[in-house]
Amino acid sequence: MKKKPYGGINDIPKYLLEQYGDRGRMIRQGPPVPMDTKSMEAISGRRTRNCSVVAVARIIDYYRRRNKITSIPEDIKHIYKDVEEIAESYGYTDKIGTFPFFISGIAKEAFARYGVKVKCRGIYIWSFEKQVVREICAGRPVIMNIARGFYKDHTVVVSGYNIWQVGEKTYPMVRVIDGWKSGYHYIDYEAFAKDIRQSIFGSFNTIKVIQ
């Protein structure tokens, strides 16, 4: 059976059938984390290597709505411009993008600009339960940085998850906003995290508002 990319999944049953031989059934689903799902180009006004900047802007916009923070602009395009300005002080350019190591600092400074205190952490040894399930169940979207495979050198926002069963085996699916296109897509966590040929290398950034 031909190996399929771990990401960009739209139709999970179809993917499971083609990848693992059965359409499976969903046995668990995380709570919804509603976010702005417009493409990176729609938010920033251009197509470039700004995935991390857009990801931070999405999360700020999410907390603006969820926590009713009036100091944050209502227009995500305005938020993006503020985040981009801060990211540039960390070395961001359209040509090279953002180094994942700096994302937590950028996010913390961006929230601080609006008078919001947050706890940001870069996670380099991670698990599905800790960095996806726990954060999503707490209503906290997560930034996911990916080094190889379908989303090579790309940053996405994790906004949900569900778990599917095929035979005796379970397959966690991570709901992400990849920004290449609008809307939600899914990552096969099993293929991403355990197949060194496809990816395995990456990191997460968790953000918790403590105001």
Image: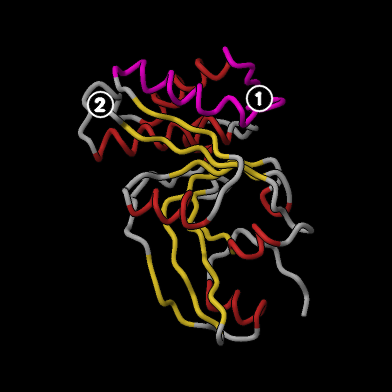
Which image quadrant: the N terminus?
Answer: bottom right
Residue 54 vertical placement versus 191 (above, below)? above
Which image quadrant: the C terminus?
Answer: top left
3D distance between C-alphas at marks 1 and 2: 32 Å
**Residue 42 placement (x, y as % from top left):** 49, 38
**What residue range appears in magenta?**
89-115
**Residue 80 placement (x, y as % from top left):** 45, 26
Along the viewing direction, whichever of 42 and 1 lies nearer the viewer? 1
Rendering quarter of residue 66: top left
**In-image side of 171 versus 195 (left or right):** left
Q: Residue at x 50, y 53 (%)?
A: 176
Q: Residue at x 33, y 50 (%)?
A: 34
**Label 1 secondary element:** loop
Q: Residue at x 36, y 35 (%)?
A: 208
What is the three-letter code of the residue carrying label 1?
Asp
Is there any visible trace of residue 183 in the rendered image? no
Along the viewing direction, whichever of 190 and 9 lies nearer the viewer? 190
Check disc 1 and report the residue beneath it: 94
In terms of sequence position, does the residue under pointer 1 or pointer 2 come before the other?
Answer: 1
What is the three-letter code of the residue carrying label 2?
Gln
Q: Tag count in the figure?
A: 2
**Residue 58 placement (x, y as % from top left):** 42, 37
**Label 2 secondary element:** loop
Check disc 2 and report the residue beneath it: 211
Residue 46, label in figure: none
Q: Residue at x 70, y 47 (%)?
A: 201
**Residue 159 placement (x, y as % from top left):** 42, 51
**In-image side of 109 versus 211 (left or right):** right
**In-image side of 178 versus 68 (left or right):** right
Residue 203 vertical placement versus 23 (above, below)? above
Crowding near the residue tagged with mark 1, few <14, some 14–19, many ≥20 C-alpha atoms within 10 Å: few
Residue 61 vertical placement versus 20 (above, below)? above
